[in-house]
Every structure is written in C-alpha cells, then in structure tokens.
Amino acid sequence: MSFHKQITIRGGGTQLVMGEGCPVAIQTMWKDKLSDQDIRGEGAKKTITRIEKLNRMGCRLLRFAVPDIESAERLGKLAAMTHMPLVADIHFDYKIALRCLDFPIAKIRINPGNIGSKEKAAQVLNKCADKQVPIRIGVNAGSLSADLRNEVLSGALSKAEALVRSAERELDFFDECNFSDVVVSMKASSARETIEANTLFASSHQIPLHIGVTEAGPLIAGVVRNTAALYHLLCQGTGDTIRVSLSDTMENEVIAAREILLAVDDHLGELSPQKGHTLCGPDKAAAHRAREASVRIISCPRCGRAGFDTHQFTEKRQDELYQLKKNISIAIMGCAVNGPGEARDADLGITGAGDKVLLFKKGTITHSIDRADADRAFREALSDYE
C-alpha cells in the first residue's frame, strides 16, 4: 500500500493538516510529568493558560510523555479541556497506547520495536485506524536494534543508514497492517547524522517527516545544533513538522523553531524570482511551504554606550511579542547609535538616548519620554499592532 503524503491530526476541535505542500508545523514537549493537581481546579487553569500561550506563540502540536496508565488518564482528561492537539508519547507498554485512544488524543508516538510483540503493536494500529488517529514512528540513534547497532560498529552501515533502515522496518509492519496515516522521525544528537538520515529517507519516500536533533543540549548549544540541521533540511524542502529539543523552556523551543523558519524564509526570499533567480528542485519545493505571520525581534547586544537595558526589556517582553500574529519587526536598541538609524526599517522600535527613551516607527522618532514611562508608552504603541 502507499502511505499518505499528508495526514490530518484532529484534537480539541482543531484540525491540523501536515505533509506535502502544507505549512511546517512547530511543536514542543511538556517538560514535566502530569499530576492530578495539573488537571484540577486552579492547577488546571494554570496548565490550560500555559498551553494557550504556547499556541499563541506558534506551537501547533504539544507532546506529553505517558509512562503509565495513570498518566494516560490524566492526559486524556486534559485533552478534553484544550483546543491544542495533544500527542501521547509511549514506550514499552501497548496497553498505555490503547488507553490513551479512549480519549480525544490527536496523535500517538510509538516505536513499534519496543512496544511488545507484533500482535500487541497491531492492536494499537487497529485502534488508531478506527479512531482516525495518526502515528509517529520515532526512531532514535540511541535505540537502534542490536543487529543494526552491530552493523554500524562493524562499518557495514553508517548511523544515518541504520536510522533509515530501522524506520523502513517499521513501515513494512505498518504496511502489513494496512495502516497509512504515518509520520516518521529519525533523530540523532549529531546535526550531520540527522541531516544525512532525513535526506536519505526523503529521497525514496514521500511520508511526512518530523525533524529535529535529539538530546541537543542546553539553550545555546541546542539552538546551534538544531539550526545547523533544520536549516539545511528545510531549505532543501525536507521536513513537515519540527521540534527544537532543548534543555530549556517550552517557550524557548517554540521561539527557536520560529526563528529557524524565519531564517529559511530569508534564504528563499533571496532566491525568489523577483530577485532574478529561478527556483527549482529543493528550493522550489521549500518555497511553497507558506509560513504563518510572524513577528521579528531585532535587539542589540548592549555595551558601555547603552542608555537602555535591552537585555531586561527584551526578556520581559519576548513571550508577549512572539504571541503577535503580524508580519512586523520590533527593534529594542540600546542607544542612539544603533537606534532609529540602524533599525530604520523596523515597524516599531524603542531605544535609549541620554536620560530619555525614544520610540520610533520606520526610523522616524515618534516619542521622547522619561525612562520611567518607557514600559507604558511601548505598550500603548504596541497596541496598534494587536
């Protein structure tokens, strides 16, 4: 049978289409184990508020680890409270997957190789088919089967080839079960191996791909490693959903993913036909992956010349700005040198100038105010874009 080039993910009254020709969907993963307090009373309100914030920031899919039946029950209850499609990430016990499917879970992530016997895995596939719930086959470099690990150690296969071989084995099983709503991921902690595996797979399959670097590290190292891999893959038209895995907050994972997509857009914009280039091959495929409206934040690194604390102001406003659904640029600059002049194209900007703070639009100063009034004035100016 042929696997679908697009899949439809349904959850919380939301429908997300993923795959060929669709926008690249950003996702992240909940960092903690769900507790009873997280889905009851004030705790539930806090959980839903944070999920809604992630959605406004651009997250379209939210995954939860489900290590036991109790976690499945909690996630199932949460799925009924939110419009965000929720994904259950399950290992080792097929009964957990079956229980999740009794609730409005949008997608299941399993590695059939560690879920038990083929008969047990087939029960999960059959129930997913009945419920119209897609499955992500998740293959990681650290969890290859023993025979593939040995082939890598002997030099018979590269790690990238082993990742692809492992994914294809699972696809063969899905084919036997006549299940076609599949997403595949092949992740390594190396950017090079991640690029090689996904490029190799995409060369012979048209199945939606979830791309990312696993165990990428803390904020700075993780962003660098993910960018190295995801930028390359997305520019060649490979990848349908991304998660920037970081030892950091979910919000920063979403922001990093958005910035990577903006960088890809910049690259493809420079290759646009309007600039005298003819898009072809991978670039042409990638150019048709329309992105959502996205704010672009410009901020200077601060130095001894600064009259305005850009670090503090950016950190305070960052999450709020990334919730704007506008194609606008916001400049947060430290002094008159790199204020309206260097950021003259910004739709809205703020900068220090001596003992004052300036607000400017498209390089034109609109207000000169006391520092104590900067927060209020910026908030009022920003309201024009909401």
Image: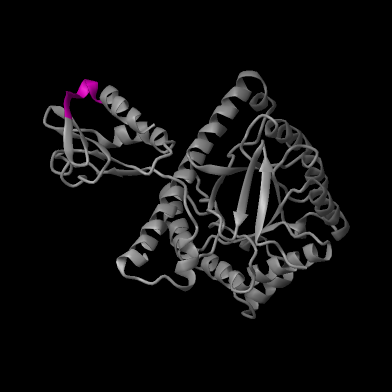
Q: Residue furthest right?
A: 119
Question: What is the residue that sits farthest to the bottom in this orientation?
Answer: 156
Say how the picture is coloured.
one colour
- Residue 45: % across, % down: 59, 23
Residue 364, compared with residue 20, is above or below; it is above
Residue 271 visible in rendering: no
On screen, residue 282 above or below 100: below
At which x and y percent is residue 320? 41, 32
- In the image, taking residue 169 as reference, residue 351 lies left or right, namely left
Pick the front one: 224 or 349: 349
Would residue 361 appear left or right of 162 to someone viewing this image?
A: left
Q: Is residue 125 magenta?
A: no
Q: Residue at x 17, y 24 (%)?
A: 369
x 65%, y 63%: residue:
207
Residue 82 is at least partly visible in this image: yes
- Spot the residue most to the front: 274
On whether residue 372 falls in the magenta region, the answer is yes
Depth check, front residue: 5 or 115: 5
- The residues colored magenta run 367-374
x 77%, y 37%: residue: 103
Q: Seen from this angle, which residue lies furthest left?
A: 354
Between residues 1 and 46, which one lies in front from this camera angle?
1
Kindly identify the residue that appears in the image at 81 percent across and 54 percent down. Answer: 125
Is 302 left or right of 110, judged from the image as shown? left
Left or right of 238 in this view: 98: right
Residue 250 rendering spot, x and y as whole percentages: 51, 40
**Number of marks drawn:** 0
Question: Where residue 241 sits in the image (x, y, percent)?
Answer: 56, 54
Q: Quadrant of the N terminus?
A: bottom right
Q: Quadrant of the C terminus?
A: top left
